[in-house]
Amino acid sequence: MDAAIEAVGAPAEVLGAVNVILPDGLFIPDIAVVDAAAADEDPVNVDAEAVLLVVEIVSPSSSGRRTDRLLKPPYYAEAGIEHLWRLELEPAPTLIVCELENGRYVKRAVAEAGRTTLIEKPLPVEVDPGALVRQRR
């Protein structure tokens, strides 16, 4: 994401484990792409309106999977965060790319391990989910 931001000169920054302030509290996505001015102002707490993209890496625990797949997305949608990516690790790394439409996230692309996929929004980036995850030995 950093390379994509630099390539297009977008005023954005990639933050890990940042507090995203939502209307009903806050969530901490695994990765957030946020407006650079907001990140400069406070790199720990960011209002949802400054967030371009949230990325959730699905937890291996059953409660974590429910949280990442079912609980968080409606709150992000209600806050108006346009893009949500979900990285599933099992059975193979897969990136689910969603975009906000009529108050709900709609799946726009599925990137599978071993294949490079171009994702155009919010920034053009080519990704192979298998390359994002360290392989177990």
Image (cartoon, helix red, strand yellow):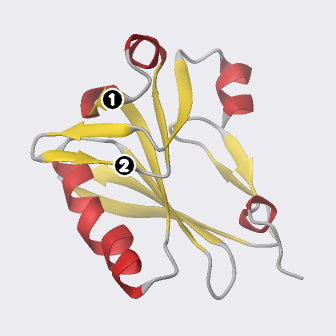
Picture quarter with the C terminus: bottom right
Residue situated in front as seen by the camera: 7 or 75: 75
Judge left or right: residue 96 versus residue 131: left
Q: Residue at x 64, y 26 (%)?
A: 5
Q: CA distance from mark 1 to mark 2?
A: 9 Å
Question: In the displayed structure, would residue 124 be above or below residue 127?
Answer: above
Q: Secondary structure at mark 2?
A: loop
Position above or below: 93 against 22: below
Query: In x, y percent, where is residue 101?
Result: 26, 52
* Left or right placement of residue 53 versus residue 10 in this view: left
Residue bearing the label numbered 1: 45
Residue at 33% across, 29% down: 45
Marks 1/2 in contact by CB < 8 Å: the verdict is no
- 10 Å crowding of disc 1: few (<14), some (14-19), many (20+): some
Which amino acid, mark 1?
A: Asn
Q: Image check: 18 left or right of 124? A: left
